[in-house]
Image (cartoon, coloured by chain):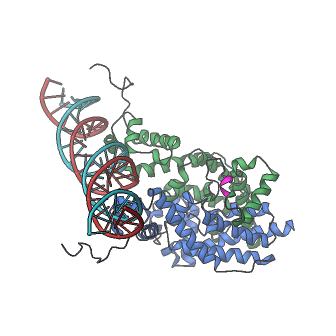
Chain colours: A green, B blue, C cyan, D red
DNA sequence: TACGACGACCTTACGTCGTAAGAATCGCTG
DNA sequence: CAGCGATTCTTACGACGTAAGGTCGTCGTA
């Protein structure tokens, strides 16, 4: 009767904060599908229903972990403090976005969650407000800044859903062999890439480089519009 | 005893095709969350377990409806048959993408499903192969075409996840009023947009126009790279 | 015509999920 | 120590995906 069946000698009390931190940990380790109220309670040495004293329901947990990640992003990008006047807007925006991307790469489940529930969260709004501020410093009109946010889309937060590249790191080029003549251009492209860079078939292609290519393409385009309008 | 309790006098036999069509219908009407094996069976006047004779499991249903939509996209875009030689590549790609987008607007659940499971499906591969083909006709190297597909990302299929604009059509600008001084740039932008186009606050902003802005920004950027490389 | 095999569908049941309702326990103040 | 609010636990329900096995109707063959 004396000792607890559980390992801990003292019981750390639950709290909304502890619940959300544990939820992020679970999602980081096992994907968003591993995040279950019961497992979450287990992780904290409690019972499922005990969580409901600190969180209204699972939806609030999901909103909560989206907010945790958004906060993490803002902490990182706000620490950059980059010069953004005139032509410097571009590198400021660029570095800010790439820094946000690094945070999201640590939480692979986060893009999907942010996308569906956090669009209007204070932290995400703040992030976009600052981004728009950098563009204003660079001479953007509100109209162009508005277009810019839309053009960047999810790239503004550092991710873009990759239609290829399942993300597991192991490209499946052998699946394509079956189609052969049906996909002449894709296969031509693949074989050329494989020829130029034999290693690349493993990772299929370099996510980071491709992300930066697309980002720069958009930023350069915006810069031209900015110059033209001023 | 004579008549069936159900309305139908004769029982239409199930089939994989009928199951998938009903699944698309359910998702179109109630969102992907409304797609349940039991509800799907109901919709077909059958019992849940009967579906498993025609489909291995729910995952296969999801893959299946993704494929149905991908087929619908290919049917539409293949019917366009646009000239694509030289400088015409751009309008060909543009119109193809906008046509694909129209299909996806009819199935709001489809982007999320395509994104997570259909990347390597034959229909999606075929779609991208043709798109790459148009760029090749325009003089793209495989390398530039490869970059182009990544830069377009989900835009190549006609969607881009909008971080703002929840999609319900009713913009929530009143939520922002509370933050006031915390979001100076976003609020400045909003008030200017509201001033220039009083109607736009209702729809928050024009999805279609913004999509095309981003698309053109990327296509123009690619065109410049193409000219420079030739 | 009888029969057995097989394809198509159904019944029952299990484990997991989110969570409603209320009981038990803890920590404090008087 | 009594009592009371804050916190946690127990029990239970309905919905979900689906495993295992049963029940038909139909059809080829004897």
Q: Residue furthest top?
A: A2
Q: Is residue B205 visible?
A: no
Q: Position of residue B36 (x, y in %)?
A: 38, 61
Q: Is A205 positioned to the left or the right of A31 in the image?
A: right
Q: What residue is at 57 percent from the left and 71 percent from the top?
A: B71
Q: Which quarter shows the N terminus of chain B?
A: bottom left
Q: Which quarter shows the C terminus of chain B?
A: bottom right
- Which of these two is toward me, A11 or A181? A181
- Which of these two is toward me, B205 or A214? A214
Q: Position of residue A137 (x, y in %)?
A: 69, 60
Q: Position of residue B49 (x, y in %)?
A: 35, 58
Q: Is B141 positioned to the left or the right of B171 in the image?
A: right
Q: Specify whether residue A171 is painted magenta.
A: yes
Vertical placement of A159 versus B177: above or below? above
Q: What residue is at 74 percent from the left and 67 percent from the top?
A: A221
Give the tally of numbered discs. 0
Q: Is residue B229 visible?
A: yes
Q: What residue is at 71 percent from the left and 80 percent from the top?
A: B82
- Which of these two is toward me, B42 or B32? B42
Give the image quarter of residue A84. Answer: bottom right
Q: Is A138 positioned to the left or the right of C13 in the image?
A: right
Q: Position of residue B229 (x, y in %)?
A: 86, 65
- Which of these two is toward me, A207 or B216? A207
Vertical placement of C26 versus B1: above or below? above
Give the image quarter of residue A124. Answer: bottom right
Vertical placement of A75 versus A190: above or below? above
Q: Which residues are magenta?
A: A170-176
Q: Is A144 positioned to the left or the right of B48 in the image?
A: right
Q: Specify whether residue B13 is painted magenta.
A: no
């Amino acid at each position: 009767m004396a000792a607890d069946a559980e390992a801990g000698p003292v019981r750390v009390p639950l709290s909304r904060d502890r619940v959300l931190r544990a939820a992020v940990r679970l999602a980081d380790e096992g994907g968003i599908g591993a995040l279950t109220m019961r497992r979450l309670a287990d992780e904290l040495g409690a019972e499922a229903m005990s969580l409901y004293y600190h969180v209204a329901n699972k939806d609030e947990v999901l909103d909560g972990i989206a907010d945790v990640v958004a906060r993490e992003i803002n902490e990182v990008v706000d620490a950059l403090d980059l010069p953004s006047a005139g032509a410097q807007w571009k590198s400021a925006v660029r570095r800010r976005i790439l820094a946000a991307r690094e945070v999201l790469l640590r939480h692979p489940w986060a893009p999907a969650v942010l996308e569906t529930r956090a669009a209007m969260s204070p932290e995400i709004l703040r992030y976009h407000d600052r981004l728009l501020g950098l563009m204003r410093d660079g001479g953007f009109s509100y109209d162009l800044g508005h277009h810019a946010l839309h053009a960047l889309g999810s790239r503004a937060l550092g991710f873009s859903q990759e239609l290829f590249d399942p993300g597991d790191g192991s490209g499946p080029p052998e699946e394509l062999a079956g189609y052969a003549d049906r996909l002449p251009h894709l296969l031509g492209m693949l074989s050329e890439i494989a020829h130029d860079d034999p290693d690349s078939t493993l990772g299929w292609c370099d996510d980071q480089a491709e992300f930066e290519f697309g980002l720069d393409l958009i930023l350069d385009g915006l810069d031209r519009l900015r110059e033209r309008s001023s």
